[in-house]
Amino acid sequence: MTSKRKEDLKGSRQEIKRKIRTWFKDNKPQEIQPKFYGQGSFEMNTTVNPIPEHDDNGNRLLKYDLDYGVYFLEEGEDNRKGIATWHDWIYESVDNHTNQDTIRKTTCIRVVFADGHHIDLPIYYKNSKIPELAHRSKGWIESDPKQFTEWFLKEADGKAQLVRIVRYLKAWKNYQENKYSNLKLASGFELTILAVEYYVPCDNDDEAFRYCIDAMSSSLHLPGGFRCIRPTTPVGENLFEEYPETRKNNFLDCLSALSEACQKADEEPNFKKASEHIREQFGDRFPWGEDKDERTKSEELSGMIAGSGIVHKPYHG
């Protein structure tokens, strides 16, 4: 994302925060006043620009998905409201914030903007070390998105390549689900966990991505290996446990196809032909490679190095 796009999205969050705070001060001054915490890919710097879509009137939509946690915090006393009550209050505080309908979901209140982006407002109560999510169908669930963000930032510290790998996975997911409207792959949250688990650092991103996908696909295809273990609260939960068989098989099939495309691209000496395999997985946002083969490019590079007086240092694995 460009700096301007990031600032625009931050501005949307700030306006929502201001509106909710004002509503609670004016209408519920004796109740716990809400606090806010940004969470998800935006805070981890792994958000990707979505493929543009269009509504029925031909308007261009960019469906950025932001999460902005609404927290009710206290110590000692337990003044929490019912899940339905807090959902109703948050809904009322942001309803008509835009000219799009505000949506009630089981895990959050969603505010939708005319340009396509939306902001989800999950609601938490915290009166101990672990926050609890107000889930409309499952009740209060221990959940700590802030802990997950801190976990990822620690795992990615000094590993800019890992952050890029996560983005590549999300861009792949975006293209595949856009191309096949009924397809539902693993969530961005789950892909982030898998990327950390199977990441292999390399000198260049194409090798690192190929090794990561190959290891991921091989492991998930093993008997009993279809697992994605949550590293933070609730620690040890297998996020794939309740996947329907169709979603599981679709994800594994797509992962195999991605792994195969990466392998074919690696074996293809011509850069343009190699990029054809990758574009099948990522669409036309992935650039065409130059219509030259690897040997020609290596010879050109060697000639440039020789002519520049730079002493070439071969790579040692």
Image (cartoon, grey):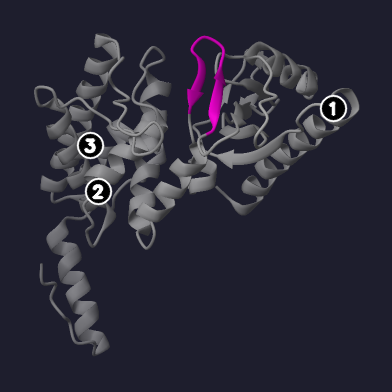
Q: Is residue 98 left or right of residue 83?
A: right
Residue at x 25% of width, y 43% of height: 197
Comparing marks 3 and 2, which lies closer to the viewer?
A: 2
Query: First in sequence: mark 3 or mark 2?
Result: 2
Q: Residue 300: in sight, yes or no?
A: yes
Query: First in sequence: mark 1 or mark 2?
Result: 1
Residue 141 shown in magenta: yes
Residue linked to disc 3:
277
Q: Secondary structure at mark 3?
A: helix
Q: Label 1 to label 3, Cα distance in Å?
A: 61 Å
Q: Secondary structure at mark 2?
A: loop
- State the residue in front, 22 or 255: 22
Residue 76 shown in magenta: no
Q: Label 3 to label 2, Cα distance in Å?
A: 22 Å
Query: First in sequence: mark 1 or mark 3?
Result: 1
Residue linked to disc 1:
30
Residue linked to disc 2:
199
How packed is label 1: few (under 14 Cα within 10 Å), some, or many (20 or more)?
few
Residue at x 28% of width, y 54% of height: 205
Q: Is residue 89 left or right of residue 199?
A: right
Q: Residue 102: in sight, yes or no?
A: no
Q: For the magenta stretch, what is the residue range?
A: 131-142
Up the image or down, 203 lies above or below 66; here it is below
Up the image or down, 245 lies above or below 9; here it is above
Q: Which quadrant would residue 15 be assigned to in this image? A: top right
